[in-house]
Amino acid sequence: MSQARAGAVRGLPAARRLHWTREPYRVWQMKLNADRSKASGKPHAVVHGVEVALREIASWPGVDSVVAGRISKVKHRYPELAVTVQSSTVSGVKCLARMGQAVQELFVVTAVAPEVIARVQRTWPG
């Protein structure tokens, strides 16, 4: 490892460091799984404010894990967290979490998809 690379990163890979973007939303790295003792694998970037929804959905019965997906920027500003169901997948449900000017995909791995869909719609109506 080169001296400049080791000193600049302080021994941590770039994917593990907290970083701020120039966008109007904040992003950081985290690991999350329904079982607090297990990590979901590689860390995923999570929009500030969406972590609340991730942790809540992960605590629901029947949910195996929650994976944060792609982040997109939108023109409309969402003043508070909004989660909507986009579609059912082979392994569970795909949701969209909206906060500020950011939209993030959430993949919920579950065997009881209809129950999760109903609970998402009850928890975040609209």
Image (cartoon, grey):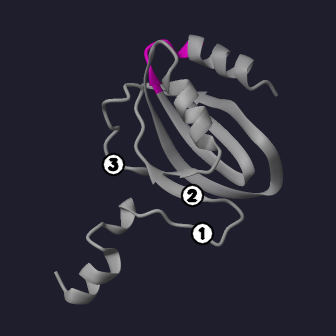
Q: Could you say which is closer to the camera, residue 98 or residue 59? A: 59
Q: Where is residue 68 in the image (x, y as percent from the top left)?
A: 50, 43
Tell me: residue 42, above or below residue 53. below
Residue at image point 53% right, 31% down: 55
Instruction: Look at the numbered discs 1 and 3 and tell me whether their residues touch, using CB distance below 8 Å.
Output: no
Residue wearing tag 1: 21
Residue at image point 38% right, 50% down: 43
Residue wearing tag 3: 42
Instruction: Look at the numbered discs 2 and 1 and tell me whether their residues touch, using CB distance below 8 Å.
Output: yes
Residue wearing tag 2: 27
Tell me: residue 58, above or below residue 43. above
Instruction: Look at the numbered discs 3 and 2 and tell me whether their residues touch, using CB distance below 8 Å.
Output: no
Q: Is residue 82 visible to us here? A: yes
Residue at image point 49% right, 26% down: 58
Category of crowding for the residue at label 3, using alpha-carbon neighbours closer than 10 angstroms: few (below 14), some (14–19), many (at least 20): few
- The quarter in which the C terminus is drawn is top right
- The range drawn in magenta is 109-114
Q: Position of residue 36 (x, y in %)?
A: 38, 29
Tell me: residue 50, above or below residue 36. below
Q: Does the magenta stretch include residue 112?
A: yes
Q: How far apart are marks 2 and 1 (CA)?
A: 7 Å
Q: Earlier in the sequence, mark 2 or mark 1?
A: 1
Q: Where is residue 52 in the image (x, y as percent from the top left)?
A: 60, 36
SS class, disc 1: loop
